[in-house]
Image (cartoon, rainbow, N blue to C red):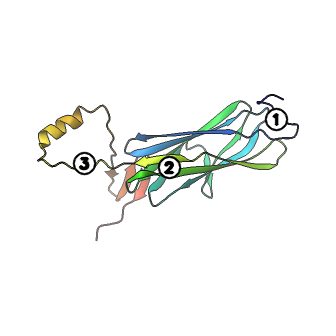
Amino acid sequence: MKDSETPRGAIKKPIILREYEFFGGCIRAKISVKNLSDTAILDVALDPVIDENILHFGRYEPDEYTEKRGKIIPGNIYPDSDRTIALYLDPLICVKEGTDLDCFVRFKDASGRLNSVQMETLKIQVVCPIFRTEHDINIGRLKELISGSAFHDSKVYAIEKDCTVRTHGMRERASPAA
């Protein structure tokens, strides 16, 4: 039997690929579920496990997928195809050692049997842009260094008349100042 073959009746589990990047002031974690079997996997549901003390789960894309009880439902994945979901996570605190992002993928095989596979843990580092120097800082020189940097990251908040905060398509109600 070849490595790519499975015994009769055995289920060939999907492969989960994952990666993250810093994007627009937040962390975008991408999770891709690849179905390499000869049959469709049905009712696929992703259940991400995030430390909410470190990362706030803001939204996901594509937003056409439904969400049910904290799980993202991309639906059916046909043979030799995949579905990729991007999670947008806002760092709440810096964690130099990193924090773990885990995900469980639940699905039904073509016979209707429930199965699951766990994604290999993705370690996300949230490093603060804090620095210390023994000497006085020349603000003009610092601005020049920042503007000449190859890497930039920012986040823009728009506060609307009704005190709604909009960021990257999300809407949150801002609490009125006391």
Q: Residues within 10 Å of mark 1 (few under 14, many from 20)?
A: few
Residue at mark 2 = 59
Pick the front one: 153 or 162: 153
Spatial separation of the CA atoms under disc 3 and disc 1: 54 Å
Residue at mark 1 = 6
Q: Secondary structure at mark 3?
A: loop
Q: Secondary structure at mark 1?
A: loop
Q: Secondary structure at mark 2?
A: strand
Q: As drawn, which residue projects farthest toward the top?
A: 2
Spatial separation of the CA atoms under disc 2 and disc 1: 37 Å
Q: Position of residue 162 (x, y in %)?
A: 35, 59
Question: Disc 2, disc 1: CB below 8 Å?
Answer: no
Spatial separation of the CA atoms under disc 3 and disc 2: 31 Å
Q: Position of residue 177 (x, y in %)?
A: 29, 67
Pick the front one: 42 or 2: 2
Q: Sequence-wise, which precedes: disc 3 or disc 2? A: 2
Residue type beneath disc 1: Thr
Instruction: Tell me what residue is drawn at x 76 percent, y 49 percent.
Output: 115
Quadrant of residue 62 in the image? top right
Instruction: Tell me what residue is drawn at x 83 percent, y 41 percent.
Output: 10
